[in-house]
Image (cartoon, rainbow, N blue to C red):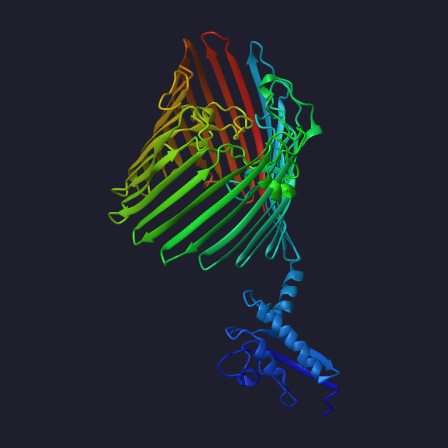
Amino acid sequence: MNDELLTMNYQLNIYHTKHNHKTCYNRESAISGFLNRSYKESPFASCLHSTLNSNTHRPSFIAHRSSLIVHHSKFIVFLLCLISTSLSAQTYTASPDLGNIKENLKSKFQKPFLINGGLSLNSVYTENWGEGATNPQPFSWIATGNINLTLFGVAMPFSFNYSNRKVQYSNPSFKFNRFALHPKYKAWTLHAGDLSTTFSPYTLNGFQYTGAGVEYNKGKWQAQILYGQFMKAVKEDSLITPSYRRLGWGTKAIYSTGGRKIGLSLFHAKDKAGSIPAPIRDKNAAIAPMEGTAFAVEGSYPVLKNLLVNFEYSTSILTKDLRLSGDTIINRASFFKQLVGSANSSTAIYHAIKAGFNYSLAQSAIGVNYERVDPGYQTLGAYYFTNDFESITANFAQNMLKGKITTSINAGIQKDDLNNAKQSRMQRLLLSGNVAIRPSQKLNIGLSYSNQQAYTFLRTGFEQINQVTPYQNLDTLNFTQLSQNAGLNCKYTLRQDKKQVQLISFNCNYMESANKKGEIIRLGDVTRFLNGNAGHTLTLSEIGFTVATGVNFSYNYAATISGITWGPTINLSKLFFKKILRTNCGLAYNTSSSLGKSISIFNLRGGASAVIAKKHNLNMSIVWQNKTSNELASTTYLTAMVGYAYSF
C-alpha cells in the first residue's frame, strides 16, 4: 500500500476514553456500526489521545460516508491533531451531531414555513352628551397581534399594538402604538422595534426604547447588546413635559456554572442638545440635555451547600447639562472619559453597592443584605430611582404546621444624608413581612406590611369600574413614592362541588407617602390612601351561570384635603350553546365627596363573546355611563366596541 497516496471509504465514529485506548478502534458504534479499517494502525489514535480532554466520554467526532484522499500520511496526523486540540479547548460545549444533519435538513424542508399566533381587531365608537361635551374622534380602532413565524427552523416572533387614536401620556417616552420583532435561531435572538430591557436596577431597568438588540443564551453564557432611541424629541407645551432626543446603547454578559455567577453590564445614553429649543417655562427650567454611563458588576458564589453569597457593584457617571463648557471633572474620573464622552462642571460620579448572603435549611431560610446608594445616584436607563441611603437588613422565612402558615420577615435599619449635607438626618427601622395562613381548604388569609420606600402605580379600583373607553388608564408610568403600606386579604369558600361554587372575599390596602424632615411631618406633607372591597360570588356550574356582588370603598387624604368614594356593583354572566357563547352584564354605582362637592356615577355594561371552531373569537360590548354633580352639569357617555380575534 502506497503510504503517499491513500484512499479510504469508511463510516467513522471515534470514541475517547481514558481507560482503554484500544476501544477507539473496535468499539461498536451506538449510532452507525463498526469502524471499518483497511490499513494498518497509524499515529492517528495516539495523536487523538494525547490531545483530547481525558475527562470527555462522549463521541468527539462523527463523519458519515465520506471519501478522503490524503497525499501524505504526515498531513493526516497534523490535521487531526489540530482538530482534536481545538475540540479539547472547548469541552464545555456540546459536540455537533453531524450525523443528524441530513434528517434535520429533511424535516426542515418538509415544513420550511410554519406560522402561529393570534391577531385581533377592535372597532370603538364613543359618544357623549352634556354641556360643553366634545367628541373630536368618535370612531377609532385598535389592532394587536402576536405572530411566530418559523422559516427553515429560524423562529421570528413578531408583536404589535396599533391604534389610530391619539393618546397623550405624562411621560413622552411611552408609546401606545408599538411594534416588535424577535427572530430566533438556535441560541441567538434578534430584537427589533419597540422594546424594553432590564440589565440591573442601577444601569438599565425596564426603560422603553425603539431600536434593536441581539441576545445570546447557551449553556453557561448569556449575553446581550442593544442600541436605540430612549427618548424622542418633544417640544415644550402646557400639557406634556418636554424632552431631548436621547440615543443609547448597552451590553451585558453573564457566565454561570454550578451556582456560581459573574456578570457585567454597561449602559450609555446621550441627549442631542439641538433636538428641541431650550425650555423656558419655570416648571421645566431644570430640564437639560444629559449624558451618562452606568456599569455594574454582579456575582454569586455558593460557599457551602445551602449558603449563597451575592453582590452587585455599580458606578454611574452623569453629566447633567451638556450645554456647559469646560472640563473641570476631577482627575480620578479621567479614566472614564472615553465612556462618558463629555465632562464639565456638571459631571459627577456616583456609586452603589448591594451584597448579602442567604442560607436555607429544611423549612427555613435566613439572610443578611447590605445596600448603599450615593446621594444623587441616577442612571438614564431608569424612570425613577431612590438614592442617598444606606441600609442593612436581615430576612427570615419559615413554613410551619405542614405548610398551613408561611411567614417571611425582613427587618433592619436605614439612614440617609450620607454626605452630611442636609440640615437633618433620618434614621429609621425598616420592617416588612408577609404571612399566609391556610387553616383549612376553605379559608385563606394573607397579611403584609412594609415601611420601605418604593415606587408604585396607584389605582383605587374605581378607575376600572368607571372606565368607558379602552384608551383610559394607559399611563402606567405615573408612579407615586410610598413610605409604608399594609394589606389584608381573606377568602372563604362556602361551598364547592360539582353543582356550585360559592365564596366570599374581603380585601383592604393602606398606603402612605410622607415627606419627613427629621422626625417631623409637616402639615400637608403626607398623603394617605385606603382602599377596600368585599364581595360574594356564586357559580352554578351545571347551567353556566355566575353572579358576583360587591361593595368598594376608597379614602384618600392629600394636602390637608380628604375625599371618600364608595359604591356597590353586581355582575352577571351566562354560558349558552355548550359554552360557545358567553354573555355578561353589570351594574355599578359610586359616589364621591370632597370639600362639599359630590359626584355620582352610574354604569351599565353588557357584552357577549363567542368562540367558533376554536380559532375565531367574536366579541362585542357596550358601556353606558351617567355622571352627575351638585356643581356641574350632567354628562352621559356611550361606548360600543366590536372585535374579532383569530388564533392560528
Q: Nearer the viewer, residue 347 or 494?
A: 347
Q: Nearer the viewer, residue 609 or 234?
A: 234
Q: Relative to 531, is 311 above or below?
A: below
Give residue 638's position: percent from left, percent from top. 54, 20
The outermost residue toward the top is: 631
Q: Relative to 260, is 600 above or below?
A: above
- Quarter holding residue 180: top right
Identify which residue is drawn at 39% across, 16% down: 523
Give residue 261's position: percent from left, percent from top. 48, 54
Q: Nearer the viewer, residue 496 or 290?
A: 290
Q: Relative to 615, is 71 above or below?
A: below
The outermost residue toward the bottom is: 1
Count of marks overlaid on the render: 0
- Quarter holding residue 25: bottom right
- Quarter holding residue 548: top left
Give residue 108's position: percent from left, percent from top. 65, 61
Q: Is residue 206 left or right of residue 445?
A: right
Q: Nearer the viewer, residue 172 or 124?
A: 172
Residue 196 in view, yes or no = no
Residue 504 in view, yes or no = yes
Give residue 559's position: percent from left, percent from top. 42, 16
- Looking at the figure, which quarter contains the N terminus? bottom right
Q: Relative to 262, is 384 above or below?
A: above
Q: Is residue 11 left or right of residue 571?
A: right
